[in-house]
Image (cartoon, grey):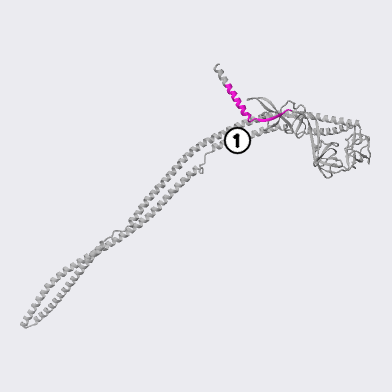
């Protein structure tokens, strides 16, 4: 085989494999159904009702209306038995009435057929318009969906770009904030370190200023020296005082001697006596000698006094100098102490200023550090994001909204067009009215045929006395009671209420079953049916004597079977839509995955139905159709289906 052939075989095998896989996967999602073929059967109607057994009053006997009376067999007050002929209707009139009802029923059925045909034509035209509107709607939805999808893609792309830019801005901002935190932390640490250094230096300055100066003994030494000099001065002064006293004593002695000398010289001058003069002269010479000695002594003492005086003055000067020096030292010490205290005060003040300054600097640095950390944390947690320029995203969103608005408007217009195409005209209930009329006429026809079968005889449903006769020979019957019978046998009556729909299957003279307690009585006769104000129908059944006791609760059951229909289905197969009925049939169809079964929608007309089965008009379905009667999912036309597994 050539290479192209091999490739073709491989591709064919792959396609076959994918087909098998696809069909296997699809089988799990396809609805499982159960089918049945239409069957021929009769539709059975059961009418039931609960009621009470009561006293029997005058019982009305009805005859079909608008029929000529041929014969009246009883009179008022006459005793009659159950089943006795009370009157005979004219057979020709009865047959004419039967033909009239048959013709009316046929006309109504033909009218219904025409109405249904016209309705089918309208439905076909409307369905075609709906199909076209659906196609337009799908195209509109698809085009608008594409526009919205493109707009949403633009929004997505814009958001992606914005997220990328936002991420870059975030990283940059994060780096800036982290750097700010580091710098704030460094500033805080530097402030702490500088605070520590400056405060330590300020403390040391306080400690240095607060140090007590070393003991200065110079004042003591100076005081000792002053004391020594004072003692020397005192001794010198004492010596000076002694010399002064001595000098003064010598001076006094000299003054005394000079005074004596002066007296002697005066006396010498006055003395005439030489001897005396000589004595005086000797005395003067002695005094002069003494004065000279004292003068020499005074001079010597004066020199000593001068020297001693100088010594005292020198000592005083030295003492004054020492005292001045001592005072200067005291003043210097006081000044130094004042300077020390001032330095200490300034050091303390500087310390407090340094502490205050750096506490503030450290606090500010710490606050900035904490604020930078909080800013970083808030940014990381997304609480402090800077507003982004979202104009592009907003514009893209506006474009989406515009596309969505346009989509909504166009979808709305397409939906309106679809709704207009699918809009059903005001419903014409003529067919339903005709169907009800047909049913009523069929019931009346059945009654007429029943009377015809009894050869026009109107019979008593119970034994009793004729209390009223409303028929006249040669005249037509009416809707009112033909006869009234009064019960003389002690019989009772059972009454119950049934719906108008069920009352269609109940007629006077019908046989029903009554059940009271555990016992059932068959062959009980319906005396009459009367329509009540609430649109229910009152059914009265005759209860013979010695059957069911007065006041007992009982239940009635009446069974009527229709004619046999050729096409019937379980009621579960019937679906309705807008007062129309349809069924799903399972048919084989070709799909992309090969042969498969699909559900096909088929419209049907219900001829008659009960709670279990429905009969269709002939022609809607055939006996060979596979009708879906049950499904494990909600179906729609064209949907793939498969049979339920056994």
Left or right, 271 with respect to 454, comes to left
Q: Residue furthest toward the bottom?
A: 273
Task: Give above or below for 346 relative to 539.
Answer: below
- Say few, some or many: other residues with alpha carbon within 10 Å of mark 1 (under 14 / 14 to 19 / 20 or more): some
Q: Which residues are magenta?
A: 11-37
Q: Is residue 417 visible?
A: no
Q: Quadrant of residue 464?
A: top right
Quadrant including the N terminus: top right
Q: Nearer the viewer, residue 546 or 295?
A: 546
Task: Give above or below for 572 relative to 330.
Answer: above
Q: Quadrant of residue 619?
A: top right
Residue 295 location, x and y as percent?
12, 73
Q: Nearer the viewer, residue 99 or 220?
A: 99
Residue 501 location, x and y as percent?
79, 37
Left or right, 301 with respect to 319, comes to left
Q: Check residue 21 for magenta coloring.
A: yes
Q: Is residue 345 visible?
A: yes
Q: Quadrant of residue 101?
A: top right
Q: Check residue 203 for magenta coloring.
A: no
Task: Give above or below for 327 relative to 479.
Answer: below
Residue 104 location, x and y as percent?
84, 31
The kind of secondary structure the magenta stretch mainly shows is helix
Q: Residue furthest toward the left?
A: 275
Quadrant including the C terminus: top right
The residue labelled by disc 1 is 402
Residue 333 location, x and y as percent?
29, 60
Q: Nearer the viewer, residue 421 or 634?
A: 634
Q: Secondary structure at mark 1?
A: helix
- Give the tally of numbered discs: 1
Left or right, 307 with respect to 67, comes to left
């Amino acid at each position: 085989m050539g290479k192209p052939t091999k490739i073709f075989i491989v591709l064919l095998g792959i396609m076959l494999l994918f087909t098998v896989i696809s069909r296997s996967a699809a089988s799990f999602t396809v609805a499982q159904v159960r089918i049945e073929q239409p069957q021929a059967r009769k539709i059975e109607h059961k009418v039931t009702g609960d009621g009470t057994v009561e006293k029997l009053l005058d019982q009305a006997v009805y005859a079909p209306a608008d029929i000529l009376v041929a014969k009246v067999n009883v009179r008022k007050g006459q005793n009659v038995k159950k089943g006795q002929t009370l009157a005979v209707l004219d057979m020709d009139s009865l047959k004419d009435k039967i033909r009239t009802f048959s013709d009316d029923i046929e006309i109504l059925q033909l009218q219904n057929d025409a109405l249904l045909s016209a309705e089918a034509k309208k439905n076909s035209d409307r369905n075609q318009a709906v199909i076209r509107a659906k196609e337009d709607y799908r195209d509109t939805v698809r085009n608008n969906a594409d526009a919205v999808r493109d707009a949403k893609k633009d929004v997505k792309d814009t958001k992606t770009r914005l997220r990328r830019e936002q991420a870059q801005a975030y990283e940059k901002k994060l780096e800036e904030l982290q750097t700010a935190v580091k710098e704030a932390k460094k500033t805080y640490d530097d402030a702490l370190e500088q605070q520590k250094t400056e405060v330590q230096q300020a403390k040391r300055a306080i400690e240095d200023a607060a140090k007590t100066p070393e003991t200065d003994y110079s004042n003591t030494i100076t005081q000792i020296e002053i004391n020594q000099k004072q003692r020397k001065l005192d001794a010198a002064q004492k010596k000076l005082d002694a010399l002064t006293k001595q000098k003064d004593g010598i001076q006094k002695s000299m003054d005394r001697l000079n005074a004596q000398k002066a007296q002697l010289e005066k006396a010498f001058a006055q003395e005439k006596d030489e001897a005396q003069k000589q004595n005086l002269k000797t005395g003067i010479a002695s005094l002069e000698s003494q004065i000279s000695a004292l003068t020499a002594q005074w001079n010597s003492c004066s020199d000593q006094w001068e020297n001693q005086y100088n010594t005292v003055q020198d000592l005083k000067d030295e003492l004054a100098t020492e005292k001045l020096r001592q005072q200067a030292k005291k003043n210097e010490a006081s000044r130094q102490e004042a300077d020390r205290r001032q330095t200490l005060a300034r050091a303390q003040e500087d310390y407090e200023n340094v502490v205050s300054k750096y506490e503030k600097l450290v606090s500010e640095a710490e606050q900035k550090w904490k604020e930078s950390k909080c800013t970083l944390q808030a940014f990381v947690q997304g609480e402090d994001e800077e507003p982004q320029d979202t104009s592009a995203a907003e514009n893209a969103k506006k474009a989406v909204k515009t596309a969505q608005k346009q989509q909504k408007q166009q979808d709305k217009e397409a939906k309106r067009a679809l709704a207009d195409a699918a809009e059903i005209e005001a419903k014409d209930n003529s067919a339903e009215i005709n169907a009800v009329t047909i049913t009523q006429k069929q019931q009346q026809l059945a009654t007429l045929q029943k009377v015809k079968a009894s050869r026009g005889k109107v019979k008593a449903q119970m034994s009793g006395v004729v209390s009223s006769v409303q028929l006249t020979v040669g005249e037509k019957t009416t809707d009112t009671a033909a006869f009234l019978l009064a019960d003389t046998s002690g019989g009772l009556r059972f009454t119950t209420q049934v719906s108008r729909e069920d009352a269609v299957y109940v007629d006077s003279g019908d046989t029903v079953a009554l059940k009271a307690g555990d016992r059932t009585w068959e062959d009980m006769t319906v005396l009459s049916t009367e329509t009540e104000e609430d649109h229910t129908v009152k059914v009265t059944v005759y209860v013979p004597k010695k059957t069911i006791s007065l006041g007992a609760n009982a239940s009635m059951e009446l069974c009527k079977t229709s004619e046999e229909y050729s096409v019937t289905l379980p009621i579960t197969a019937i679906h309705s839509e807008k007062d129309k009925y349809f069924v799903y049939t399972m048919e084989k169809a070709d799909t992309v995955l090969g042969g498969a079964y699909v559900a096909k929608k088929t419209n049907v007309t219900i001829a008659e139905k009960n709670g279990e089965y429905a009969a269709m008009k002939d022609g809607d379905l055939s006996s060979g159709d596979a009708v879906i009667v049950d499904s494990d999912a909600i179906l729609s036309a064209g949907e793939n289906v498969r049979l339920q597994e056994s």
